[in-house]
Image (spheres, grey):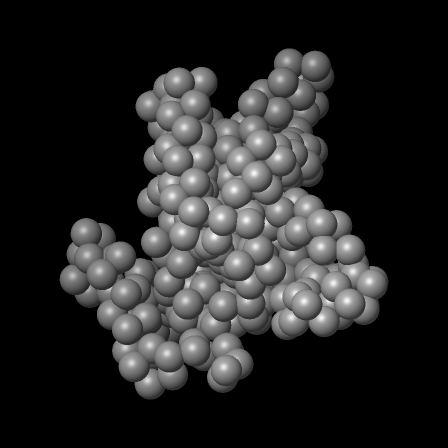
Amino acid sequence: MLQILADGLIIGSVIALGAIGLSLTMQILRFSNFAHGELLAWGAYLALVGSAALAQVTALMGAPLAPFSFGPGLLVALMLSAVGTAGIALLLDALLFRRLRQQGSITLVIASFGAALALRNLLQYWQGGVPQYYGENLQIALNIVPRRVAGGLRATPDQLLVLVLAVVLVAALHLFLKRSTLGRAMRATACNPALARVSGIDPERVLRATWALGAALAAVAGVMAGLTVQLRPTMGVEMLLPLFAAVVLGGVGSVWGAVLGGLIVGLAESASVTLVGAEWRAAAAFVVLIAILVIRPTGLMGEKS
């Protein structure tokens, strides 16, 4: 039981970070961006390429950072990847979405499908279809809780780092949205775009910040997914449905709702792998989603209109 819970929290923390960015873009940009999963995949691969390049510059960057499976170069590459993925999102907005913004959300959704296909195929052309890893060192899971206590609990140092990083980033994002001027402008635009514009808030600045922040969080989620599993060009589309499930489950526009939704989806997937098989993990997540929406259509933390 404890192992199912731990695995669910690890999976859920990855989903939650990606879902936060998707929730923000859905609330502020007013459309469902189906290219968001590809930003996650691009972030993961940009970090892979960046860490490999840093390891070529100096061996210290590639040497394993005990007790983890990767070197310090990956931490630097993670920050560069977040910036690079934010740049990709802003470029997509400038070349595609900004030009279609006046044509309605349906047009933007269809355009995001096309953007997702283009990004996925470009990534596969660049990196190939073979799964890759950030490090070649195998990790031994640590015995955190003895087996005699509820079946025990084992986790690798990489998995524990993923949990800690997710907590730190969610707390930092909460402070940013609550305390900073730009964060308050984003919250105001999400609640009432017309009133925010009348109050002197620059909508384009808020939109650019939303793209950048959502893409940066997607990049971190992609790296975390690569650390706990592996990197594949299709990882973005594989993560997309759990991301949307987490957003809808938690309530569109709610940061803490996205976190809660991500954790619930992660726990449902973890339980389904153990109880009924890995092939049913996506189905189990949507069973939970449907059950919650029957009770509360706006999501767990969404506001009633």
Residue 84 rendering spot, x and y as whole percentages:
64, 32
Count every numbered label the image shows and give the total. Answer: 0
In the image, what residue occupies the spot 29% across and 81% down? Answer: 294
Q: Is residue 289 above or below residue 165?
A: below
Answer yes or no: is residue 211 visible.
Answer: yes
Which residue is at the far left?
A: 276
Question: For the point 43% across and 23% down, which residue is it?
Answer: 122
Q: Residue at x 68, y 68 (%)?
A: 194
- Residue 109: horizontal and vertical position, in percent? 42, 48
Nearest to the observer: residue 274 or residue 92: 92
Residue 205 appears at what percent x and percent y?
75, 50
Res. 242 image quadrant: bottom left
Question: Residue 225, can we see it?
Answer: no
Q: Say which quarter of the image contains residue 143.
A: bottom left
Left or right of 166 in this view: 154: left
20 on left or right of 190:
left
Q: Residue 199, position in %: x, y?
A: 81, 69
| Whether residue 281 is situated above or below residue 71 in the rendered picture | below
